[in-house]
Image (cartoon, rainbow, N blue to C red):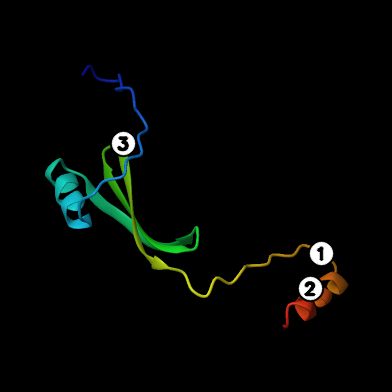
């Protein structure tokens, strides 16, 4: 490819029925390196999120690692002291 001209990037999300180890091996074979990882909670589940990078390309891999119990809500309040006190008392805090 000529210098200064970048190849068009596509976005694709796929579900695969293979182990995380096979996915990692496949990415390693073509030069992707693990850049970062995190455990997150989304949709009532714990997920292991992995970020792989090769040049200016990125691949994010998510593996479900279990249900998130108990399913406690997070409450963020931007309000007066009275509002905060009322909400905290109302939820048993």
Give the mark toward the camera: 3 or 2: 2
Mark 2 sits on what residue? 87
Residue sitting nearer the eye, 3 or 34:
34
Give the mark toward the camera: 3 or 1: 1
Query: Mark 3 and mark 2: span between their CA atoms?
Result: 46 Å
Near mark 3 (Cα within 10 A), the count class, few <14, some 14-19 or many ≥20, is few
Mark 1 sits on what residue? 79
Give the mark toward the camera: 1 or 2: 2
Q: Position of residue 91 (x, y in %)?
A: 73, 77
Residue 31 position (above or below residue 5): below
Quadrant for the C terminus, please: bottom right
Which residue is pictured at 30% across the width and 53% down the height? 35
Query: Of the residues under marks 1 and 2, which one precedes in the sequence?
Result: 1
In-image side of 93 versus 74 (left or right)? right
Which residue is pictured at 30% across the width and 20% down the height? 4
Near mark 1 (Cα within 10 A), the count class, few <14, some 14-19 or many ≥20, is few
Residue sitting nearer the eye, 20 or 33:
20
Mark 3 sits on what residue? 56
Which disc, if any, is residue 2?
Answer: none
Q: Secondary structure at mark 2?
A: helix
């Amino acid at each position: 490819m000529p210098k200064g001209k970048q190849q068009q990037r596509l976005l694709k999300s796929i579900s695969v029925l293979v182990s995380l180890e096979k996915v990692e091996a496949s990415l390693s074979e073509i030069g992707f390196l693990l850049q970062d990882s995190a455990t997150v909670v989304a949709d009532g589940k714990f997920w292991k999120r992995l970020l792989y990078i090769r040049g200016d390309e990125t691949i994010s891999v998510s593996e479900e690692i279990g249900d998130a119990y108990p399913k406690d809500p997070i409450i963020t309040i931007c309000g007066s002291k009275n509002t905060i006190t009322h909400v905290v008392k109302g939820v048993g805090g």
